[in-house]
Amino acid sequence: MIRRKFEKLFFMMAGAVLAPLYCCRKGHQEDSLNQPVFIIGAPRTGSTVLYQALTNCYEVAYIDNLAAVFYKNLPFGIWLSEKIFGMKPHNTFKSKFGNTREYGWHAPSECGQFWYRWLPLDDHYVDRGQFSASAVTEIHDEIVSCQRVSGLPMLFKNLNAGQRLRLIADAFPEAKIIYLKRDPRFTSASILKARKENHIKEGEWWSVKPKNFRQLMALSEVEMVVAQVYYLEHQIEKDLSLFSERNTLRLHYNELSEGVVRKIGNWLNMDEKSGAEVPEFYRDSDKKMDKELMGQISGMVEAYPFPGDVPE
């Protein structure tokens, strides 16, 4: 921990020296082929390991833990990271509920601080009319500037983005969206486990917030979690219509594999990195679940109109 603090201080001091030498080119002109990519979904649906796999195996721009230090000047952070690490694989597949800060400076970061420069901290859902035209322009220009550093599209994994698709559609109408789903029973069970491990009390919120989260906090813990998953996915399903079908890819947790990672790489037209490892992917199974808990969750899931489109 102490070593990491010294390293962060060193990078910040180096940034203060180098930033004036870095020329950030801004503007609306951009390479139409380089559109940002967003991984979205409810929490605990496999988004972190997919993010790690894609950033490890393919040449794509992303915010690593070093670039995240400079979230107020993200193009510079991307530039500095590329000067230090180049296109080397990070080979990091560990996280603590999406947080990778303990696992290396080149490991991919969600970097929520970048988005909170323009968006509210307490409300994750933003509708048109809740953000200004200037915010859209600034976000657009900042991301375009990041992409110009390497000439590659930016890959983001910040699950709050699933509740901000209206903003993203205004800033990047041709953005590409990877939407991850999971059997809601297992998603809910995994969220409940995460709540327990993070010492979240009943009646308190954890992770991504749908627009009606305040009303949901009055529910029992199990129903609140099931409702959280339902309303997050319901909003995503509704707002995906803002993007063309050719720019959206729907995946299921149980489908994740090395082959699917390659499929995504081909879909995004990305070049492979040499020496990159592929993480191990897991599948859900009723045999691994506590029967009593699964019974409670299943009863709640049946009370919500989840679409019956999950593979066996």
Image: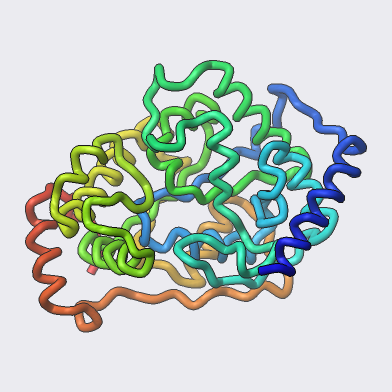
Residue 254 or residue 200, whichever sits in front: 200
Across and down, in percent, residue 78 comes to 74, 47
As drawn, 93 above or below 304: below
Quick check: can you spot residue 107? yes
Q: Which residue: 58% across, 17% down? A: 134
Across and down, in percent, residue 181 comes to 33, 56
Q: Which residue: 40% across, 17% down? A: 129
**Quadrant of res 138:** top right
Query: Which quarter of the rendering shows the C terminus?
Result: bottom left
Across and down, in percent, residue 72 comes to 68, 37
Across and down, in percent, residue 177 comes to 46, 44
Q: Which residue: 51% across, 45% down? A: 38
Q: Which residue: 42% across, 29% down? A: 166
Q: Is residue 275 left or right of residue 41?
A: right
Q: What's the colour scheme?
A: rainbow
As drawn, 81 above or below 235: below
Query: Which quarter of the rendering shows the N terminus?
Result: bottom right
